[in-house]
Image (cartoon, rainbow, N blue to C red):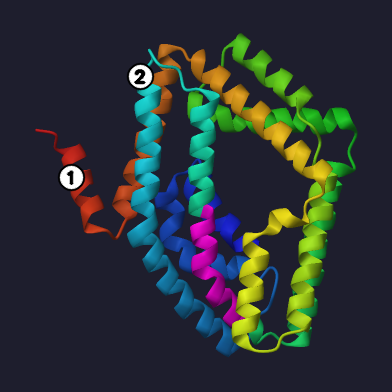
Amino acid sequence: MKKILVLVIGLILLSACGPRMYYPKLDWLIPWYVNDYISLESGQSSQFRARLARQLDWHCRTQLPEYAEFLRDIRREVDDSGRPVTVERLDAYKIRLTVYWKALILRITPDIADILYSATDEQVDELFENLENKNREIESEFVAPPAQKIIYKRQKRMQKRLDFWLGDMTEFQLQALTDWSLQFESIAADRVVHRRKIQAAGRHLLESRTTLDEFETALRGLLTNTEEFRTENYQRKIDVNTQRTLELLAQLLKTLTPKQRNHLSKRLESLATDFDQLSCDPASKKNRAKVESPG
């Protein structure tokens, strides 16, 4: 179920094509994605689509305006070249993203619970078989290859993301990226172990369903406290990698060329404007009109 959340956040916040291309299509993209994991029966599918429509309306009205403001807060800091963005400020933005994530989880948990509560034994088997197939895919791509290949592909993935936000990087910035990739602690194997623990707990919940209220409460606890399934070593690696990544981003932001700063500022404002245009909140539309007609 967390995969649904990843899809929503990923398409909205990280897509290089912009949210205007994907967000209006989530009403059919998400069911298509869900069907990769569990085949819904006719009644379940109708219920799922009705609930999805309500949640997308909520998300459009209440969350998109916050995403737009979030991006503009970053843009204002980027535009102030006299005050470099610090690791502490980047960490604060990370915390804000976590708040958005948690709000989305809490909002949709009752709907997920209702759908899963009616799942048959066959559907439960299908769901966890497909989740295990995904685990194996992760192992094949991120655990099994030689360490040097994993490091190289990690660097290339990050460089692609940074190129989108910054444009062409300088030699100094590329070296900083290389250093980051070499220092990054591999966590793919830990991630798969973590996934399997959560999935085992989820399967236990489904196999011991009693009342809907009890199931929803237990599912909410599982989805909002996945960190509890991390080993101490896995958590340590996450903390170290997070700190190193924030330090990399802070270093890159301190070394922006005027062209890169302008590129980043425009990217941030463009995505914020996309959220304004997609928002169902009248105040957001009004704010967008002011931006477009400053006079």
Return the x and y of residue 229 as percentages of the image width and height: 77, 56
Answer left or right for 104 relative to 271.
right
Location of mark 2 (residue) = 80
Return the x and y of residue 209 as percentages of the image width and height: 72, 85
Q: Which residues are magenta?
A: 101-115
- Residue 160, quarter of the rendered image: top right
Q: Name the residue located 65 percent from the left edge and 80 percent from the top edge.
A: 215
Answer whether residue 182 is magenta in the image: no
Q: Nearer the viewer, residue 29 or 257?
A: 257
The extreme top residue here reads: 172
- Three-letter code, disc 2: Asp
Q: How far is mark 1 from mark 2, CA to CA? A: 24 Å
Answer left or right for 134 relative to 295.
right
Classify mark 1: helix, strand or loop.
Answer: helix
- Residue 149, quarter of the rendered image: top right
Q: Name the residue located 78 percent from the left edge and 74 percent from the top edge.
A: 203
**144 relative to 5, above or below:** above
- Three-letter code, disc 1: Ala
Front disc: 1 or 2: 2
Q: Nearer the viewer, residue 105 or 57?
A: 105
Location of mark 1 (residue) = 289
Q: Quadrant of the C terminus?
A: top left
**135 relative to 292, above or below:** below
Return the x and y of residue 125 as percentages of the image width and height: 80, 78
